Image (cartoon, rainbow, N blue to C red):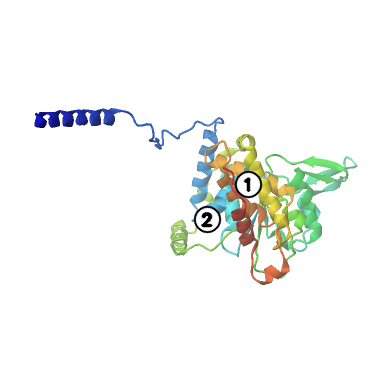
């Protein structure tokens, strides 16, 4: 009898175990891609397709330099200007030219020199003998994308001529205002090593650049790939490989979509906390202005859109912080003599500011 009762108890236990195994568990979380695939409230499919086309065209010539390409595209989406800094020969100028070539927009290149005058950039009024009136002749600044090569080689008077056009997308000549054709983007290059025959850019002008993009040397594998591609060209032009894709209307449309990207109020405060921390940092002689906080806001929206998201995350803000701030803050002379850089201080500030959850 005891043996029979033991068998019955074992059967009941087995049945209970089977029932428990068949019951759905409530503690498990489905982390599959389908479960976390949220639908965007803003349709960014056309924007992403356009960005991929641009990246594909540029990658036909440029090896590596993905952060630079991402920031250049983000600056266009955010309707901002970029300052590209690097030693000679690291594809600063060719990258800007390729970017312009991949877009179906107007392009103008201006080589800055010490004898360049404001009228050489903006244009000038010429007296017409037939009509006995002055006629304004547009300068090379009247285009959609402007490449300014070696921007720090022009004197202060010429630099000042860029203030109005970079900020307000217009110029004023002889009391008349002339609006730029949109989109209007300035890409400028400068060499940080050679200082002979150069002029330091005014802080007010630096503040008008959305990004300052630093370009480093390629690594060994990238250097080999550069040589292989140059050999395969057989003397042909690099720009001949590039096709134009996005029109002015498409770019303007994408810029409008980026403006609609959603950002929560606690992330707004996160941006403000970072900016205020630059003003209170003992290692910085000059902190960031409100224009810098607006620049981070616009850039973080652009980075979010490039990732296919219609909302900003803290990672987007972190990605935008260094290229937006590094040319807007000034290290104290004592720390600069110790070799402390603006990037290091900005990184410290970002790490110290609490990330909103």
- The residue labelled by disc 1 is 75
Alpha carbon separation for disc pair 1 and 2: 16 Å
Give residue 49's position: percent from left, percent from top: 51, 38
Q: Badges 1 and 2: C-beta atoms under 8 Å apart?
A: no
Asked whether the viewer can see residue 108, the reply is no
- Seen at 64% across and 36% down, the residue is 259
Instruction: Return the residue nearer the eye: 32 or 273.
Output: 273
User: Which of the 4 image quadrants contains residue 168?
Assistant: top right
- Seen at 17% across and 30% down, the residue is 9
Give residue 227's position: percent from left, percent from top: 46, 62
Secondary structure found at label 2: loop
Residue 319: give its label: none
User: Which of the 4 image quadrants contains residue 333?
Assistant: bottom right
Precedes in sequence: disc 1 or disc 2: 2
Quadrant of the drawing holding the N terminus? top left
Quadrant of the drawing holding the C terminus? top right
Give residue 203's position: percent from left, percent from top: 76, 57
Residue 317 in the figure: left or right of residue 208 = left
10 Å crowding of disc 2: few (<14), some (14-19), many (20+): some
User: Which of the 4 image quadrants contains residue 224?
Assistant: bottom left
Secondary structure found at label 1: helix
Instruction: Return the residue nearer the eye: 317 or 61.
Output: 317
Asked if 266 appears above or below 4 in the picture, the reply is below
- The residue labelled by disc 2 is 65
Residue 32 in the figure: left or right of residue 263 = left
Asked if 335 appears above or below 185 in the picture, the reply is below
Instruction: Return the residue nearer the eye: 106 or 131.
Output: 106
Give residue 62's position: percent from left, percent from top: 51, 54
- Seen at 20% across and 31% down, the residue is 14
Asked whether the viewer can see residue 134, the reply is yes
10 Å crowding of disc 1: few (<14), some (14-19), many (20+): many
């Amino acid at each position: 009898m005891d043996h029979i009762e033991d068998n019955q108890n074992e059967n009941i236990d087995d049945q209970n175990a089977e029932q428990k195994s068949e019951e759905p568990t409530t503690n498990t979380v489905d982390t599959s891609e389908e479960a976390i695939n949220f639908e965007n409230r803003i349709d960014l499919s056309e924007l992403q397709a356009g960005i991929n086309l641009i990246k594909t065209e540029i990658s036909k010539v440029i090896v590596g330099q993905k952060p630079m390409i991402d920031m250049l595209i983000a600056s266009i989406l955010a309707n901002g200007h970029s300052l590209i800094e690097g030693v000679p020969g690291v594809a600063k100028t060719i990258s800007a030219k390729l970017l312009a070539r991949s877009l179906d927009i107007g392009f103008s290149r201006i080589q800055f020199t010490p004898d360049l005058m404001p009228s050489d950039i903006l244009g000038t009024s010429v007296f017409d003998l037939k009509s006995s009136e002055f006629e304004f002749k547009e300068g090379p600044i009247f285009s959609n994308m402007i490449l300014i090569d070696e921007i720090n080689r022009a004197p202060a008077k010429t630099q000042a001529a860029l203030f109005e056009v970079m900020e307000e997308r217009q110029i004023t000549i002889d009391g008349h205002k002339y609006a730029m054709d949109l989109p209007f983007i300035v890409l400028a290059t400068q060499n940080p090593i050679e200082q002979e025959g150069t002029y330091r850019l005014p802080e007010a002008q630096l503040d008008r650049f959305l990004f300052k993009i630093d370009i480093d040397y390629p690594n060994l594998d990238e250097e080999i790939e550069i040589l292989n591609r140059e050999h395969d060209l057989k003397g042909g032009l690099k720009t001949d490989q590039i096709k134009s894709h996005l029109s002015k209307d498409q770019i303007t449309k994408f810029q409008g979509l980026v403006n609609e990207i959603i950002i929560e109020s606690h992330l707004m405060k996160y941006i403000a906390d970072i900016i205020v921390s630059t003003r209170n940092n003992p290692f910085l002689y000059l902190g960031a202005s409100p224009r810098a906080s607006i620049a981070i806001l616009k850039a973080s929206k652009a980075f979010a859109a490039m990732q296919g998201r219609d909302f900003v995350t803290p990672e987007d803000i972190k990605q935008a912080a260094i290229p937006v701030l590094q040319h807007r803050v000034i290290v104290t002379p004592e720390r600069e003599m110790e070799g402390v850089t603006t990037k290091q201080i900005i990184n410290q500030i970002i790490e110290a500011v609490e990330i909103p959850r």
